[in-house]
Each structure stands twice: as C-alpha cells, then as structure tokens.
Image (cartoon, rainbow, N blue to C red):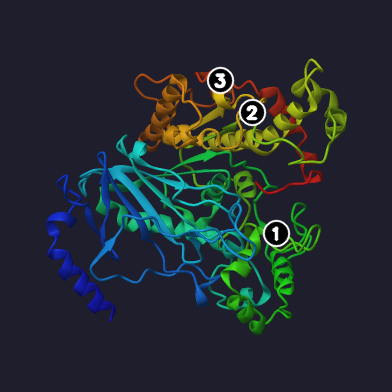
Amino acid sequence: MKSLVLFLTLVIGCSISSYADGNNVSENQRPTIRVESGILEGTTEEGVDIFKGIPYAAPPVGEFRWRPPQPVTPWVGIKNASEFGPNSAQAGWGAPAGTIAEGSSEDCLYLNLWLPSGAKPDAKLPVMVWIHGGGFVGGSGSGTSGSQIANQGVILMTFNYRLGRLGHFAFPALSAEHPEEPKGSYAYMDQIAALEWVRDNIAFFGGDPDNVTIFGFSAGGVSVHSLLTIPDAKGLFHKAINESGGGRDGVLTGRPISKENADPFYTVSAETIGINFARKHGIEGTDAVALAKLRALTVEDIVDGGQETNGEGGPRTYAGPILDGMLVVETAESAYIAGRQVNVPLMIGSCSAEIGGSFVNNSSSKEELFNLFGDLKNEAEAAFDPDSNKEFEEVITIFNTDWVWGEPARKVARTYISENNPVYIYHFDFVPPAMRERARFGAGHGSEVNYVFNTLNSRRATEEITTEEIELAKIMNAYWTNFAKTGNPNGEDLPVWPIYNTHNEDILDIEPSGKPVGKPDPRKARFDVIDKASHIREQLQSRGI
C-alpha cells in the first residue's frame, strides 16, 4: 500500500513538474514543492513563499499519546499548505472550564516555512528554526511571521511541539511499556523530529541542511540548551541562539523520572506526579490498565485548564521537562560542566528586567534578600544597590533577572569560549516610549522578540511605533540573520558587536535609548557575586518560566 501511495504521488507530481521542481513560479501561480511525504502548495506574499501546516510527524493521538513522534503517512495529490495547522492543545487565556484554547488540538505536529520566492533547490540558503516559548504549557509556531527573515535571504521554519502533560509526562506503566523508546519529554522528541524533517526536506525549498541555526526564547531558550546537550540532537543544527533561556539548573531543567529526592530542585519524581494526576481523575493503580484509562481521558481532561497542582497547595500534577536517562540523560548545566555539549557558534542573552516579584524567592525586603548571600552580603549590596537608594521592587526585579537569566547565560558563554567557539552576548534594555510607565525598571521577558523578527506592526494598533524602534528592528533582524549565515552577527552599516572573551567581557548592550553599543558588560559586579553565591542556589525556590 505504501508503494502504491508513493507511486501515485510521483505520477501526480510529474504532471505539475513545472511547479514542483524548485518553487519557480509566476506571480499568478502558487508555489508547489514536492517533499518526501508528498506535494505541497503554498502561497506567495510580497516576494516571500509561505508554506503552512506541514505535518512533520503523525498525529500523536490514541495509542500514540505519550509515545515518540511517528512517521508521516504520505498523501496523494496536492496538499494545501496555505493555513496554519492546529496549535498544541493548551488552556489558553479565558478558555471556559473543561475546554482547551480555540484552535488548539492534540493533533498538532505541524511546521511552517517562509522563504525567498522562487528559491531554487540548489540555492543553499541558510535555515533558521524558531522554538517558541510559553513555559512548555503554551504558545505555538504560528505566533510570528517569518517574512522579514526570508527577505534577508534566510529560510525560517517554525513549528508546534506537544505542551503540558501531553509534552511532559511519566507514569510507572508508561515507563515499562516499549522499553526501547525514550520516555518523559515528548516535547523534546518532537523538536528533534522537526529538525530531522529539516535535514531530510529543506533542500527541496532551496535550504542548506548543513547550515541550520536553532533559536528560541524562554522555554524555547531552555529547549536550545537541551538540544545542545541531548546526544540524539547532535548534527541536526550548526549554530544556536538562546534568548532568555537561563543555563543553570533550577528552572525547567529536568526532573528525575522515577527517583524521589534525587535533585534539590525537584524532590518529587515525574512518575509520582503522574500518579497524582491519575488519582485526581479517579484512576488508581500504576499498571497497564491504569495507563489505558489515562490514554482514554479526553484532551480537555489532560490539559485540565492548565492546572499544575490538584487544588491550591495540593499535590503536583505537572512535571515539566524530565530526565529519562535515554533521551535526556542529564541537565544542560551538568553537560556544560563536563564539556559534553555540541560545540557550535553561540549567541546568547536576555532582557534587562525579565520578571519581578517572588519569582525566585519569597524575600519581602532588600535586607531579607541580601541576607541570603551570607558572607557575601556586603558585596551583594554594593553590586545591586550601591547607593542604598533603590526601591525593593527594582532590586528584586534585577536580582531575578540576573539570577535566572543573565548570569547563567554568562556561565554558558564562558563554557563555550573555553572550547574555542565564537560567542556573542547581548543585553536588551530598550523599552518603547508607549510602555515606559508600565516597564519602569527595564525591558521585560520577551521584549526583544518582535525586534528580532522585525514584526513591530504585530503589536497593538494603539501603540505608536517610533523611528528609533523601526531602526532597531532592522538592526536586530540583520544581526540574527547574519549570524545564521556565517556565525558572526556583524555586517555592513551595523554597529560592531564584539566577540565575547573573559579578558574584557564585551557584549552588545541595546541601551535604553535603543542604540546598540559594544562595551564591557555593565552587569559584571552583579554577575560576579551571583557566581560566588552559587552555593545558595539550591536554597531558593525555583518556579516555572
């Protein structure tokens, strides 16, 4: 049967070979490309060919819930690739109880491509693969446009991966079945499958499978760290960009699958959390019968309104990323310390005021916060509040940002340059005028993303876009695509972004004015005291991004 499907696909493809042999079409024709699974018909918008909703794995439903991604069944005829596929099932904002977000589904493993119109199969265009954020419980590959990246001569791929309990789940009977398969972090399995699709298919679109850059923000940045250190991902990409992904253990970095109290951050195992979730839904036992009942739950029951505990203060019911020992064999920090990461050119950074409040700890005053540093208290005060006149809200915001994102990024950068990899660090401190009253202490989590994609028009229509913002978006879009092309973000008419080294610790600082400036890292004193205080890291309560 499979041979017949492939034969029919080839026969039908031959009848439209003028379209399918390289996306070389006239203005009135829709771009048509033959990939391994069949023929795709996309759209063209202002010089960019767009293909949406391409399946890169079979629907992970029924018996394939909590299984590695399965191969796509080839299709006959021409598949319409003009609309996004469903997002990964998630709660979403404002979704009524017992429902999932509109447009989301358990059938979600789809990807999207933006490329220069008419690219020939032998064009060897660089490829960027975007991994969306959302704490591993929200977000999608349809959340941005890649047209401005394609306009720079680069192919952009975005994709969905399984989220929440569909993306990270463990249960004793699940661990016992199919012992040859990895368990736990199905989201990472999806990400690897999407990269394998790029390896096997991107040349049909004119892309270079040997010049692939992964980049991601927040949970997508955590994913970049994971892909840099998961053995099965080796060779699937050649450069990496990490935006607000941390780099040390503690936040979304891997829960032991079965051992209790094996990790100071994650004292409860992923399997115990799976049992908690089963009990919440009246499923007792841990055998194959219980697992069958879990697989029979509706997707709405699995998403469970996004709840991660059984009631306020109740037993935990969502694990987050899992260390299964087969796919995810260690945390990224552990791999970095041992030198087991993939060595590629790296760009890494974060924003200036990622998040405040009690994200990292429950301190309620500067005194309480600085006391955490013990013998380093005076050094911490001098670094974070040198004139003793900052309000607590600013200090805790900067502390959270440095502790979770800033200093860990520097730690990773130092690991990479020790292996002679080129590293470029950025610090994004620009807040648009329309947001300065709300963002008093700096740029919040994800502030740089619209500038990277040069999609400022996607912001609310009520916000005025200034000439400074427009120029900054052009510059950042150029930096990111230049890095994808060559491993160096610098280019003609761009402010020089210095390569990082430990001698002068130069970074690119996108200042509050919006001007990118290469200079020594102004956060050095704060990072140094955090590095010295790493022994207290385990004492702080880590919470999800």
Q: Nearer the viewer, residue 437 or 52?
A: 437
Q: Which residue is mark 3?
A: 511
Callout 2: helix, strand or loop?
A: loop
What residue is shown at x 62% (from left), y 77% (from top)?
176
> In the displayed structure, does residue 470 sit left or right of residue 18?
right
Q: Residue furthest top?
A: 387
Which mark, by number, is residue 308?
1
> In the displayed structure, does residue 377 sit left or right of residue 120?
right
**Residue 395 coordinates in the image, percent (x, y):** 75, 27
What kind of residue is marked 2? Ala
Alpha carbons under labels 2 and 3: distance apart: 15 Å
Callout 1: helix, strand or loop?
A: loop
What residue is shown at x 63% (from left), y 76% (from top)?
294
Instruction: Give the mark, 2 or 3, whose residue is nearer the N terminus.
Output: 2
What kind of residue is marked 1? Glu
Alpha carbons under labels 1 and 2: distance apart: 28 Å
What residue is shown at x 52% (from left), y 47% (from top)?
224
Mark 1 and mark 3 residues within 8 Å of each other at the beta carbon: no
**Closer to viewer: mark 2 or mark 3:** 2
> In the displayed structure, does residue 113 sit left or right of residue 21?
right
Alpha carbons under labels 1 and 3: distance apart: 37 Å
- Label 2 crowd (10 A; few <14 / some 14-19 / many >=20): some
Instruction: Give the mark, 1 or 2, whose residue is nearer the N terminus.
Output: 1
Which mark, by number, is residue 439?
2
Above or below for 206 versus 425: below
**Residue 439 coordinates in the image, percent (x, y):** 64, 28
Q: Nearer the viewer, residue 250 or 77?
A: 77
The answer to whether one can see residue 421 in this image is: no
Q: Residue furthest bottom?
A: 289
